[in-house]
Structure formats: structure tokens, C-alpha cells
Amino acid sequence: MSDRVSYYADAMLSVARGEGNIGGISNEMFTVARAVESNDDLRSTLVDQRIPADRRQQIVEDLLDNKASAATVGLVSMVVGAGRAGELGKMADAFAAKAAAEQSLQVATVRTAVPMTADQQTRLAAALKKSTGKDVDLKVIVDPSVVGGVVTTIGDTVIDGSVRSRLSKLRETL
Amino acid sequence: MNTDLFFIAAEGPNGYFFPSDFKEFIWGSISFLIVASLLVWKVGPIISKMLNDAQASAVAEANTSDTAVREAEAEMASLKTELGDADAEGRRIVAEAHDTANQLRVDENAKTQKMVNDMWERAQNDVVSMRGQAGSDIQGEVSAQAITAAEAVVLESLDSQTHVGLIDDYINQVGAS
């Protein structure tokens, strides 16, 4: 993690702390970052320095209007206006890690092909706590490339129960 | 012949045995002796020398001839020897050329045989390799088709219920580990 990414993450954490909503803002930042990463047109637009900063910020505000908290919209707008939209994902990850650490949690990034229900997320968090011995902050990402099942990443540990990996193993076997 | 001259002179008119005056005879004899002595004294050595020179020249020529003859004979013998040597050398060269030709033929045959053997071995290796490659290609193609079919079957069977089941199974496995 670069110093700049860490500084931005600290700033985001300070804002979230001031808002008294560290977990919520962290989740929203994580979700927005994944959405930007998965949309090539949106990402190239937000990083395009030829487009005036206020225009790019306006795009962010229009997209997130009524879909995220004002603090989240303000943080994303700040990053885009500073011309650092290309690093938004890393900043959101760092922010999530710092926010989880502040709450004595560990970030668990969960990728599924279809959205998980709240019950499934609760049971998965409990299962991960039982498995790792730590409380986890689930960050769920819907990723069709998983095909089916779940891939969980906690720190450097990857628990891969996806259909994609099973098909890959089948391909290697054949 | 001198005797005949004496007899002819004795028939001369002077009444002497000699054909003319005795004084004339004496002076004539003395003159003759003087001329003869001069001839013997002066011309004799010259003639003798000439004869000796001629004899020496003849001897030298004879020696030269003998030497030339001997040299010619030696040359002839040498030529005969060389001719004999040339014949032997010719036979040796012919034999050597024959041996060389035979060796070349043997070497060429061996080289050709080796080349044929190498080509045959390469061809066999190529056949084996191509057969293996063809087998691998077919196996790869079959595997790819099988994987494609398996993926198609899996994707087709992944309805919402299956997704829920896969996630629940995953949660149970994580909790059990």
C-alpha cells in the first residue's frame, strides 16, 4: 500500500468516524469502488484528465444520488476531483481494512455469482469466525466469473469453493 | 733403289765406279749429310713432337672414346635400371590406385549405408513422434470438447436453487473446517 493510498484511507476513516457510521460508509465505498472497477466506460471517464474535474464529480454525484450516504458521495467525489479515480479501489480496500481493524474485525472479501441473502452473509460470517477465530467484516462482490459457489479472501488466505475452480481442476485433470 | 742408282752411275764415262766426279760425290755426300743432319737436328724434333702429339691426341681421343663408351654404357644401364624402376613404379602406382579405388568404393558404400540407416531411423522417429503428437492432439481435442460439454451442462443446471445450495454447502464446509 502506497503512502498516498494510506493517507486517503485515513482521511476516509476520519470522515466515517465523524459521521459515526464507519461500517456503513466502508461498505458503500467498497461497493462503489467495485462498481467503478467493473465498468470500463465509467472508469475511463472518471480517470480522464481531459474532462473537467467538476464534470467528473457531477457524474459521480448523479450516479450515487439516493443510492449512498452523503458522506460516501462526498468521499468518492473528492477522490475523483483529485484525479485519483484510478486508485479508488485500493483506497476503498485500505479504508475497509482500517475500518475493520478499528472495530476489531478482519475484512473478508466474498465473491459469488449471485447476490447472497442477509441470512447467508450472517451464517458465512459466523462460519468464518469459527474457522479463523476472528470476527469478520464481509464485503460481498457479485462476480459472474465465479460461475457458482463462493470465493472468500481473508488477508492472504483464499477459501475457494467456486464452480470456476472446479472446472479449472477438471480441465487440468483432463 | 740406291743400289740401282750406283749401277746406273757405274756405267758413266768417267771410268769410276761412281757415276760422276769423285769430288762431286764427296761434296754431294757432305752436303747431303749436312742437309740430313740439319733435317735430323731441326726438323726431327718437330716431326717427333708432331708424331708424339698426334699419338697423344690419338690416345686421348681413344681414351675419350672409351670414356664416352663407358659413360654411354653406364647411361644405358642407368636408363635400363630407371626403365625397370619406372615399370615397377608404374605397377605400384596402378596397384595403389586400384587399392585406393577399392577403399573409396568401400567407404562410399559404408557412407551410403549409414546415410540410409540414419534416414530410416529419422523417418521412424518422425512417425512415432507424429503418432504421439496426433494422439495428444486428439486427446486434447477430446478433453476440450469434454470440458466444454461439462461447462455447458453445469451452466445449464445452475438455476437459482442450485446457487443457493452451492452457497449453503460452502458455508457449511467453512463452518465445519
Image: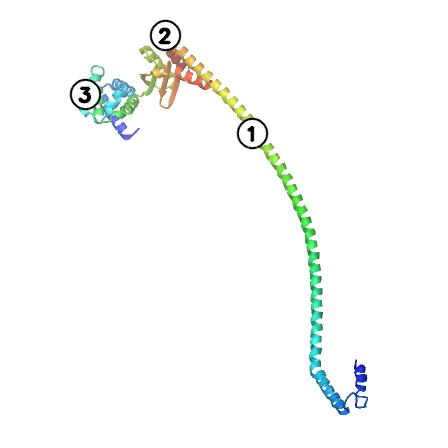
The residue carrying mark 3 is A58
Q: Position of residue B151 (x, y in %)?
A: 41, 13
Q: Secondary structure at mark 1?
A: helix
Q: CA distance from mark 1 to mark 3?
A: 76 Å
Q: Nearer the viewer, mark 1 or mark 2?
A: 1
Q: Position of residue A132 (x, y in %)?
A: 38, 19
The residue carrying mark 2 is B161
Front-lying residue, A92 or B141: B141
Q: Residue at x 39, y 18 (%)?
A: A160
Q: Nearer the viewer, mark 3 or mark 2?
A: 3
Q: Are marks 3 and 2 in contact (CB under 8 Å)?
A: no
What is the three-letter code of the residue carrying label 3? Gln
Residue A168: quadrant of the picture: top left
Residue A111: quadrant of the picture: top left
Residue B9: quadrant of the picture: bottom right
The residue carrying mark 1 is B119
Chain hosting mark 2: B
Front-lying residue, B103 or B26: B26
Neighbourhood count class around disc 3 (C-alpha, 10 Å): few under 14, some 14–19, many 20 upward: some
What is the three-letter code of the residue carrying label 2? Gln
Q: Are marks 1 and 2 in contact (CB under 8 Å)?
A: no
Asked if residue A162 shows in the view, the reply is no
Q: Position of residue A74 (x, y in %)?
A: 20, 21
Neighbourhood count class around disc 2 (C-alpha, 10 Å): few under 14, some 14–19, many 20 upward: few
- Mark seen at residue B169: none
Left or right of residue B112: residue B162: left
